Image (cartoon, grey):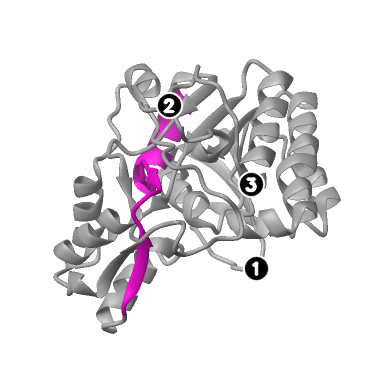
Amino acid sequence: MKSKLLIIGGSGLVGSTLLQYATPNYDIHFTYNTNKITFDNTNSTQINLLDNQKKNLELIKEIQPDIVVNTAAQSSVDLCESDHEIADKLHVKITQDITQVCKDIDSKLVYISTDAVFQGELNKRYTEIDSTNPVNYYGLTKLRAEQIILNSSKNNVVLRTAVVYGHHKKSRFTNWIIDSLRQSKNVELFVDQYNTPTLVDDLTKSIILILQKNISGLFHASGSSCINRFEFAVKLAEKFNYDKSLISPVTSKEKKQDAPRPVSTCLNSQKLESLIDFQFSSIDDGISFIFNKSN
């Protein structure tokens, strides 16, 4: 008998990719907000978490899933900085409610977190034991969510990742770069903010391996290349054969953002890689993957 898997945020980049890889081996139900999608052999429910959290909690109780993967988040760092109420509600209050229901029905909860929990001033890649100190409200609320989940049950999982991308209509950064260059538009990108961009297929495969091996705890799950957005875009241009001279470097001082950003939050994912016998892609391999998918 297949385990029951509930994916909260099933129409997003991570959620819908997880659907593709998990459907053969799990009895899947997923929620979506506004973008309805259909997958064979799955069930779905439309829920706006911000407006109807009660419906979401009732759904979890009704389905009684063995596993809940919560991918829902307000991914705009600047919006979280300007609207604390939304960030608090979605990342903290709603997470708290979901976590409690999962505990009540003995469901394993997997939560997608972020590298933004770190201050970004360490001269090495961050590991799971390094101190957290977020510099923006997005990172602060995601850190609070992590603490709620990990303190609730030793069976839960928190995965910190960064700049998730792929061959997908929801891969906003890579699609914006490719579409802009295709239309010969100039783009400005930061050279002083470093992350470890993560191929969404890698992230979702790692989730399935974690579930198969019944691993729990806090893990970093991100790509192997520490790179800034300007370098990322140049590599995309080179692979897709677009004019990379359209891409201009800019610094955080030159182009202000509403929320402060850490300088370098590159993650070390070796702990998880060794446990699940898996290797996250480099940026070159990840870009090659989406290039091959698009042709």
**Disc 1 and disc 2 in contact, CB within 8 angstroms:** no
Residue 2 in sight in this render: no
Q: Quadrant of residue 271?
A: top left
Residue at label 2?
A: 126
**Disc 2 and disc 3 in contact, CB within 8 angstroms:** no
Residue visible at 39% across and 43% down in the picture: 195
| Amino acid carrying mark 3 in the image | Tyr
Left-right relation of 79 to 171: right
Is the C terminus in the top left, top right, bottom left or bottom right quadrant?
Answer: bottom left
Residue 292: give x, y in percent of width and height. Answer: 19, 59
Which range of residues does the magenta coloring cover? 186-212
**Residue 209 counted in the magenta span:** yes
Residue visible at 42% across and 26% down in the picture: 126
Q: Secondary structure at mark 3?
A: helix
In the rendered structure, which disc, 1 or 3, sits on the residue that comes first in sequence? 1
Q: CA distance from mark 1 to mark 3?
A: 22 Å
CA neighbours of label 1 inside 10 A, class few (<14), some (14 to 19), many (20+): few
- Of residue 161 and residue 19, the one placed in the foreground of this image is 161
Residue visible at 79% across and 30% down in the picture: 100
Which mark identifies residue 138? 3
Residue at label 1?
A: 34
Residue 286 in sight in this render: yes
Residue 55: give x, y in percent of width and height. Answer: 82, 52
- Of residue 110 and residue 234, the one placed in the foreground of this image is 234
In the rendered structure, which disc, 1 or 2, sits on the residue that comes first in sequence? 1
Left-right relation of 134 to 223: right
